[in-house]
Amino acid sequence: MFEELSSRLESVFRKLRGYGKLSEQNMRDALREVRRALLEADVNYKVAKDFVAAVESKAVGREVLKSLTPGQQVIGVVHEELVELLGKKAVSLKPASKHPAAIFVVGLQGSGKTTFTVKLGVHLRKKGAKPLVVAADLKRPAAVEQLRILAESVGLTSFIPAKGETVLDAAPKAFEQAVDGGYDWVIFDTAGRMHVDDEMMSELIQLREKVPPHETLLVLDGMTGQDAVNVANSFQKAVDFDGAVLSKLDGDARGGAALSLRAVTGKPIKFVSVGEKPDALEVFHPDRMASRILGMGDVLSLVEKAEQTLDAARAEEMEKKLRAAEFTLEDFLDQLKEVRKMGPLQDVMQMIPGFGRIQKAGLDVDEKALGRVEAVINSMTPDERRNPVIIDGSRRKRIATGSGTTVQEVNRVLKQYFQIQKLLKQMKRGGRKGLSFLPF
């Protein structure tokens, strides 16, 4: 997420940390590099200029705290201004006084509207609500079928218009079904176009008259930079919207949309989509996003993700085994699967403070390597997983063949396991408390 921008800013701050004392000229030189990094990330020119001016006015002349180096002090100011630029605090969906309440998901084709519609349904269901998703995009071929299949895959109820029915006829029927079925939210996946046009806006206006929305969310492709802001401006003038959703932030997103949107449109970013899975949706927290951009990690989001995906009972059972130093290869495999449930490991690791510097040192996370570890352990017999000391040369060859790996990789997995076992026994003898374990 915003890797290029983060890398450029990290380079600037590394230079600042090298100064024992900062002069105004040092500061201005560094901020010139910050502005260049923002512009290369496709941040709106005026937004980048105002941002640098705000940082400079706060940083120049501010007394440097004794506990911090001057470089760290500047980073603190940049973080404050990034949080301000991104919207200060998280903005959730507006509470509805009456249910069901309609949510319109709008945007251009290819922005990720249909996927987000289902993700939002999953998100609301986790909150204890009962959502209904509605196929209201009758323009794009297969859009209706895509929504139906996605909703079915995660156990959401969908409303599919009858063949030949217009969206203006179908929308009131969908809302009636929601009333009769006791649904809390009705999420309409509305039609998009390749570009903003009068026909598109006219249909949205008519649809709003048929079913007044409680909230309208604009889905924007996070990889398109300032183009996303231009789209937002067009929607704002024609039909308005309550908040934005940035999709595809797990891809090559440069950051221009996220950093420009609030300043240019005045509208908050409410959600960010960070993957293909139905639960790969995060509430947008400006302070956490600012920390990620600056390479400070995002521990709060990491904890929340762990709480949502990891089994508390199994975690407690695992802790007991770890304390007793009874950790087997079966337990190792279980832990590996639990962590991988949290999403792509690269994304999870990005939330750990300082991970960017680890990457620069060449110690990157290889998702495929973890898959090979899993394959190696799966190729062992139950006895071998529970008592790996019995794995001799011939068994190692068999495991390598069965897992599609090499004997060297099997040896590496076993070596790592025995090192963990040794560490656990040392901790048990030392009486260490609060033991935790992640298999990477």
Image (cartoon, rainbow, N blue to C red):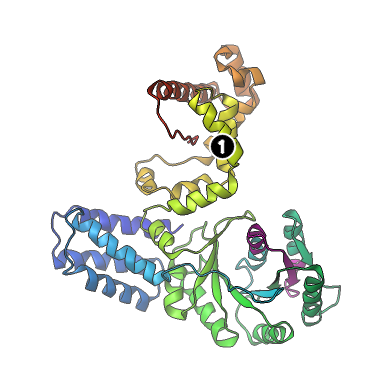
Where 68 sits versus 91, above or below? above
Q: Along the horizontal axis of the image, is 343 left or right of 364?
A: right
Q: Is residue 188 visible?
A: yes
- Total count of labels: 1
Q: Residue at x 66, y 21 (%)?
A: 382
The answer to whether residue 219 is magenta is no
The answer to whether residue 136 is magenta is yes
Coordinates of residue 32 in the picture (x, y in percent): 25, 68
67, 134: nearer the viewer: 67
Where 90 sits versus 126, above or below? below
Q: Residue at x 44, y 63 (%)?
A: 254
Where 431 sits versus 272, above or below? above
Coordinates of residue 79 in the picture (x, y in percent): 33, 63
Disc 1 target residue: 315
Q: Along the horizontal axis of the image, is 193 left or right of 151?
A: left
Coordinates of residue 126 in the picture (x, y in percent): 64, 57
Q: Residue at x 60, y 78 (%)?
A: 195
- The amino acid sitting under disc 1 is Ala
Hey, which quadrant is residue 315 in on the image?
Answer: top right
Q: Is residue 190 visible?
A: no
Range of magenta residues: 120-144
Q: Along the horizontal axis of the image, is 376 left or right of 52?
A: right
133, 346: nearer the viewer: 133
Hey, which quadrant is residue 123 in on the image?
Answer: bottom right
Where 328 sits versus 367, above or below? above
406, 222: nearer the viewer: 222
Neighbourhood count class around disc 1 (C-alpha, 10 Å): few under 14, some 14–19, many 20 upward: some
Hey, which quadrant is residue 112 in on the image?
Answer: bottom right
